[in-house]
């Protein structure tokens, strides 16, 4: 790319950045937890329409995606699950096409009194913008949009088709991204600006969500010895799952990108409910579990291992031996994905282009990292034969209290993204 063109693009990002910060603040103010994403999606759809993009806004139909590879089981209705895609159609189509993907859904805020400022009343303090979803990942979603704006402000447009995707369901299934594939959106590469500190994610673990359902025998606490406490019965099962976690993390089971990571796969008991009355021995208990898997680890075999582990542990309990725990899968059923395993020319070219863009902005080589969580890249990399790159800003306390994202980091990522688009897609006159 000619130096003067690159400078025009970088200057355009700088000139638009106050507007970008205001746009991000407005988007963070929409409390787009699962099932409540509609107002935020309407805001994104309007922004795309105002910019002249063709906008596709649709309600996800589970029956359309249920049989596709990568589908995660769901509990409840998808009547409120809406995706938004804005399309730029190139006049010349001389470059390579691109998907700019990001998710609009955010995790719950938790107890509000534990926040420094209200989670959906974003606030800027110094270099930080605070708010739920500011980092994960509305900052990246907005960076995608304003990277395209910078090209336009500099007098250019991508010389290939670009699909801007704002999806739901990333935090619990990924079915929003899968629905984009089912709807026919394909490209030569994908960029997802998740907040991983301006590094390129070379590998990510997969995730399995499941519930364990237990039934006990209720009785008055005066006769507790005659009952079976379903909540207490969960303890040995949880211990058995942690033993499975240790076994899966053993060196001989690790993917090569995690060879030196002693504990890449994390089991989390994220929720437990049970019982009906303080003076009654609880008759039921349900606990929710999140477990990681390595890239290449077979999900069917992993599920079988989980279920066998629970049943073997139940055999050691006199009540559970006759009242077996049951497992329900209710969310993520996600394979791991390693960009590093993709040796194709498009993958190497995309990585090289992003590396060059990053260095042009930061004067540093682009570092690569393996992460112990999942992103939507797996759908494109595993099921659409498309290299999927994760590269986003520096954020802190994502999924925690006082989530915040660095404004200077957002600016650098927006600049690098704009240069990457210009290189990958090529440029044509606006």
Image (cartoon, rainbow, N blue to C red):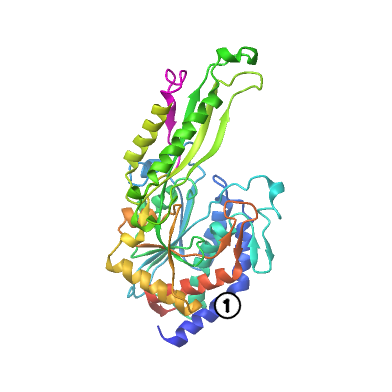
Query: Could you tell me which residue is drawn at 38 percent across and 47 percent down?
Result: 250
Point out residue 19 in the picture as x, y percentages from the top left corner. 61, 71
Q: Residues within 10 Å of mark 1 (few under 14, many from 20)?
A: some
Q: Nearer the viewer, residue 102 or 329?
A: 329
Quarter assignment of residue 307: top left
Q: Quadrant of the C terminus?
A: bottom left
Tell whether 382 sits left or right of 145.
Answer: left
Point out residue 105 in the picture as x, y percentages from the top left corner. 53, 51
Query: Could you tell me which residue is drawn at 45 percent across and 77 percent down?
Result: 359
Point out residue 280 in the picture as x, y percentages from the top left corner. 63, 18
| Residue 196 visible, this orientation | yes
What residue range appears in magenta?
314-331
Q: Is residue 194 above or below residue 318?
A: below
Quarter assignment of residue 326: top left
Q: Which residue is mark 1?
A: 14
Quarter assignment of residue 281: top right
Point out residue 127 in the picture as x, y percentages from the top left corner. 64, 69
| Residue 330 visible, this orientation | no
Secondary structure category for the residue under label 1: helix
Tell whether 347 sits left or right of 39.
Answer: left
Q: Is residue 311 above or below residue 422?
A: above
Task: Inspect the magenta stretch and tell me whether residue 329 lies in it.
Answer: yes
């Amino acid at each position: 790319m000619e130096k003067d063109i690159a400078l025009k693009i970088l200057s355009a990002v700088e000139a638009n950045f106050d507007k970008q910060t205001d746009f991000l603040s407005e988007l963070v103010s929409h409390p787009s937890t699962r099932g409540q994403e509609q107002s935020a999606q309407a805001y994104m759809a309007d922004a795309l329409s105002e910019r002249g993009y063709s906008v596709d806004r649709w309600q996800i139909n589970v029956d359309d995606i249920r049989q596709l590879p990568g589908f995660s089981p769901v509990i409840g209705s998808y009547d409120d699950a809406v995706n938004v895609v804005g399309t730029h159609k190139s006049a010349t189509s001389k470059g390579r096409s691109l998907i700019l993907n990001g998710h609009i859904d955010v995790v719950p805020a938790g107890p509000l009194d534990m926040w420094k400022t209200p989670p959906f009343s974003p606030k800027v303090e110094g270099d930080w913008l605070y708010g739920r979803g500011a980092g994960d990942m509305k900052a990246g979603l907005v960076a995608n949009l304003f990277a395209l704006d910078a090209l336009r402000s500099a007098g250019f447009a991508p010389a290939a088709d670009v699909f801007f995707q704002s999806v739901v369901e990333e935090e619990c299934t990924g079915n929003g991204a899968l629905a984009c594939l089912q709807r026919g959106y394909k490209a030569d590469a994908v960029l997802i600006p998740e907040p991983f500190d301006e590094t390129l994610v070379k590998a990510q673990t997969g995730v399995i969500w499941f519930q364990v359902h237990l039934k006990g025998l209720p009785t008055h606490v005066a006769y507790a010895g005659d009952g079976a406490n379903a909540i207490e019965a969960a303890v040995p099962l949880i211990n058995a799952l942690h033993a499975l976690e240790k076994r899966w993390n053993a060196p001989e089971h690790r993917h090569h990108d995690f060879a030196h990571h002693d504990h890449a796969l994390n089991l989390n008991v994220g929720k437990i409910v049970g019982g009906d009355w303080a003076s009654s021995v609880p008759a039921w208990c349900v606990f929710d579990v999140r477990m990681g898997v390595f890239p290449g680890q077979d999900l069917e075999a992993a599920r079988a291992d989980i279920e066998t582990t629970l049943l073997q542990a139940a055999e050691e309990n006199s009540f559970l031996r006759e009242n077996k725990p049951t497992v329900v899968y209710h969310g993520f059923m996600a394979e791991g994905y390693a960009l590093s395993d993709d040796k194709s020319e498009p993958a190497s070219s995309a990585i090289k282009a992003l590396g060059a863009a990053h260095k042009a902005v930061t004067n540093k080589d682009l570092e690569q990292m393996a992460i112990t969580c999942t992103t939507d890249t797996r759908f494109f990399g595993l099921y659409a034969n498309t290299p999927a790159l994760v590269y986003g800003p520096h954020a802190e306390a994502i999924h925690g209290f006082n989530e915040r994202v660095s404004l200077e980091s957002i600016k650098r990522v927006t600049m690098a993204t704009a240069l990457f688009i210009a290189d990958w897609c090529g440029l044509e006159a606006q």
